[in-house]
Image (tube, rainbow, N blue to C red):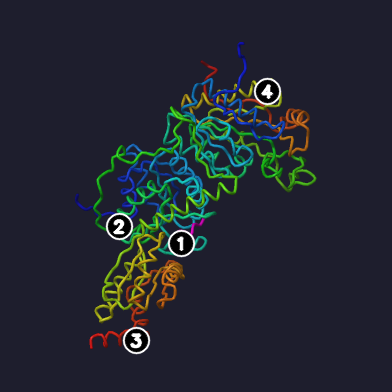
Amino acid sequence: MNKIFTKPKSLKPNVMHYCPGCGHSIIHRLVGETIDELEIQERTLGVPPAGCAVLAYNYFDVDMGEAPHGRAIAVATGLKRVLPDRVVFTYQGDGDIAAIGTAEIIHAANRGEKVTAIFVNNGTYGMTGGQMAPTTLAGMNSTTTPGGRDVARDGAPLDLTQMLATAKGSVYLERVTVASPKHIRQAKKAIKKAFQVQLDGLGFSLVEVLSPCPTNWKMAPVPAYEWTLQEMTKIFPLGVIKDITGYDEK
Amino acid sequence: MAKRLMRGSHVLGEAAVRAGCRYYFGYPITPQNEVPEYMSARLLEVGGTFVQAESELASVNMVIGAAMAGARVMTTSSSPGISLMQEGISYLAGLELPAVIANVVRGGPGLGNIAPAQSDYFQATRGGGHGDYRTIVLAPSSCQELCDLTVRAFDLADKYRNPVMILGDGMMGQMMEPVEFPEMQELADLPAKDWIITGAKDRPSRALLSLLLTPKVLEDHNYKLVRKYDAVTRTETDWEEYLLDDARQVVVAYGTAARIAKGAIKRVRSMGLKVGLLRPKTLWPFPSEPLKRLTRVVRQLLVFEMSAGQLVEDVEMAVAGQAQVHFYGRPGGVVPTPEEVAHQISHYYYQAGLMNDDARAQG
């Protein structure tokens, strides 16, 4: 029989620990497919976050190095500066990259570090049990915003990717989602392009992926996917946020 | 090789380069700014990489990444900056990554001042970050020794896969002395590392991590670290003995304080007082055994440090009540004079009646 669909070889055969309906397993797969298609498995290094994806080294079949919470892109900087011909990516959640690690990500982007960040935005702190994230929507419930995020008290949702667009060293920034098959295909294209930017040595690239967290949103998976598309994209609109790669002009 | 007259901060940088350090990540803080300034220029010459990070947190995590990739890597800072690096130092220890961190200590706590101090002794020798771990801590007391111990720091870091701290102070950073440097270490001659991550070519993929969720597994990891620290203690403990042969009182001091103590001891020796010095060169592992041995013949120790009293606790633990332990220290970046210390030495010497012992011994 002719096999037409299989697990990427850059993913280990381990069963993932993620909750039903969580976007991480889809995003892992997209990164794995990208590594396979670009044929870079032997020279890719990943840096997982603190948070739900902390165990990513159990799933990606590439060399991985752990970082303290929020510091993934600084660790990635050290790796890439020593190994400039390797491909280095970080995989970070919204708490990791947009709260505790804000300084590191802005300055890495500004220096134009030739690394790729996969920024998974589910608007909540998943691993610690659903507290407010910088990206939690206004009015959205979390365990630390009872009655909903109050902008006057808690601030408005932070658009990190938009902030990174002002950094001169960021070359390609796109926001995608995995909330429907069509969007998953678009997310794959963006992730692959972000890795290509690094392979071409152009500078810093980041893909923000809006991802459902049914468990902490206290929704069933299907409504969580619908909510991602309908509500999250209002505050975090999908699309290319910055692209100075010049690829389209070729 | 001819000696070169050089400032301590530059000695630190040059010795690191000669030891094979090609990566430096740092953030400016007084009184050690001459180190990143030196490295920014020197690493260009040898094809290395210098990154001025946005913070000490970022610096130490860049160090983590570079160490994971197998490089000899260093960062330097001063007290408040080292506090910020403690998270990363705990991870370096947990991940068993070799790296060199120099702390050019200034007065604290808080912003304190930029004067030379030894008030980070506890932080350096006890860990500072979270978890059961040890940092190897080297305490040079001259520019030549700063050079030698910097080279040794890189070797120890690789040998034990552990962070090594060089504990100096602003005095050491600024003073100029003639130094003889070792030849440039050939990078190809450095021992190979079979655990680093460089991409999983021709081998299974690897993960470097300190997350060990199963308590027993983490306990095993901690016991493995304990065995490593025991081996470091057995093998690497280092100290200097100065005029100990006939000493009735022993001064214990390290770094800049030990230099001042030597001046003080010369003074009191000229007055006929039999005083010697034991100077720890490794603050962790601490030279407890030689101190314990000393108590068989010496009943009085004077611990002298530029802090409100930190080293004194290690000395007290080592002698375990078998000798009197007196303390003289000045915190806040005040550097005592040799006269001042000589006064303290003779005060305790006479108070204990050691002068009479000397007379009796002479018969």
Residue B25: image quadrant is top left
Q: Amino acid at mark 4?
A: His
Kindly state the secondary structure of the residue where label 2 is placed.
helix
Residue A18 found in image quarter: top right
Kindly identify which residue carries mark 4: A183
Name the dominant secondary structure of the magenta segment.
helix
Q: Secondary structure at mark 1?
A: loop
Is B324 covered by the magenta stretch? no
The kind of residue tagged 2 is Glu
Say if the magenta span includes residue B122. yes
- Residue that badge 3 annotates: B353
Residue occupied by mark 2: B145
* Residue that label 1 marks: B120
Residue lying at the far left in this picture: please name it: B2
Q: Are marks 1 and 4 in contact (CB under 8 Å)?
A: no
* In this view, the mark in front (1 or 3): 3
